[in-house]
Image (spheres, grey):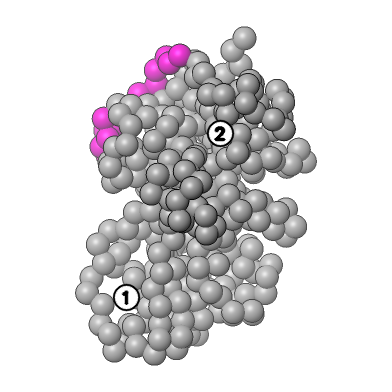
Amino acid sequence: MRAWVVAEPGPVGREPLRFVEKPLPSPRPDELLVHVRTCGVCRTDLHVSEGDLPVHRPGVTPGHEVVGEVAAVGPAVSGFAVGDRVGVAWLRRTCGTCAYCLRGAENLCPASEYTGWDADGGYAQYTTVAADFAYRLPDDVDEVTLAPLLCAGVIGYRALRRAALPPGGRLGLYGFGGSAHLCAQLALAEGATVHVLTRDTAARRLALDLGAASARGAYDAPPEPLDSAILFAPVGDLVPVALRALDRGGVLSVAGIHLSDTPPLHYETELFYEKELRSVTSNTREDGREYLRLAALHGVRATTHTYPLSRAPQALQDLKAGRFEGAAVLVNDLPPLH
């Protein structure tokens, strides 16, 4: 099969990805073989490709927002059949026995593994997934629209819950890419007032089109104090900016897996009055199932830009350069293997 691999992590302009022939993956007894139909392009793929995240598997195939069809079922799997539509997401495996897993915090499992980092992901014709970590997907939503929900959507959902937004609260979103524009739709549907702070003018227009109350520059002050804020941009300099924008008792949630260094924080102006700074680490499967239910209920839809699988490097370059608003999605335009 054809697949992209991270041959040598480095700036995407130097083409760290290579399009290669690889053997068709063989699913383990508890896994599904999935024929990839679409795969969202996540900023985490950029971090893996450029080396911002340490190499977990040399020559890994990125991609963890996969919509596909089951092509084969491992002998220990029940409840799935060939032809079923499934989603493959970032969280790939957990131990299921540690203190974190047992208390419902499997996203903190020390033995957790991740699709497109610890194991080959969806920038390929086929991938595998443990059946217990596969998501059942509706048949009435197109596969391009669904793909970004599987990470950008789910992580935005967890970040929103970590931000402890009160009912009808004032939410600030710093950065407005694939994850933030999905998060905004859910927050608005649940009654929040949303203020967007981003450097990108096209993203500001999209935010206003989606119903945001305001859209300003990333370092600007919002028009009113915020009850909660989420930092989606991987820019540590924005942490004190967002903290200063919070009202008393406000919470800032940092959504990304990678963040540039933060400057020193000043206690009196940025943390006093019981403000909180929280991080977000992956998500649980329950987060994913609940988010997909809410997204369907409220009609959350990704603004998407498609690329054929063969142009995955261009999609990553465009993501880094901010050449599109919303999310990029790779479409597998290669025929299935028989």
Q: Nearer the viewer, residue 40 or 303?
A: 40
In the image, residue 195 above or below residue 99: below
Q: Position of residue 188 (x, y in %)?
A: 64, 69
241 relative position to 148: left or right: left
Q: Nearer the viewer, residue 157 or 2?
A: 157
Q: Which element type, helix, strand or loop, lies under badge 1?
A: helix
Residue at the spot 52% in from the left edge and 55% down from the top edge: 102
Q: Position of residue 289 (x, y in %)?
A: 65, 51
Mark 2 crowd level (few <14, some 14–19, many ≥20, 10 Å Cα) = some
Residue at the spot 40% in from the left edge and 78% down from the top edge: 276
* Badge 2 amino acid: Ala
- Can you identify the residue that label 2 sits on? 130
How many marks on residues?
2
> Any magenta on residue 12?
yes
Q: Is residue 150 visible?
A: yes
Residue at the spot 30% in from the left edge and 64% down from the top edge: 236
Residue segment shown in magenta: 8-23
Q: Position of residue 156 (x, y in %)?
A: 53, 58
Residue at the spot 51% in from the left edge and 46% down from the top edge: 96
Mark 1 crowd level (few <14, some 14–19, many ≥20, 10 Å Cα) = some
> Any magenta on residue 87?
no
Q: Position of residue 138 (x, y in %)?
A: 74, 41
Q: Quadrant of residue 27?
A: top right
Q: Which mark is residue 240?
A: 1
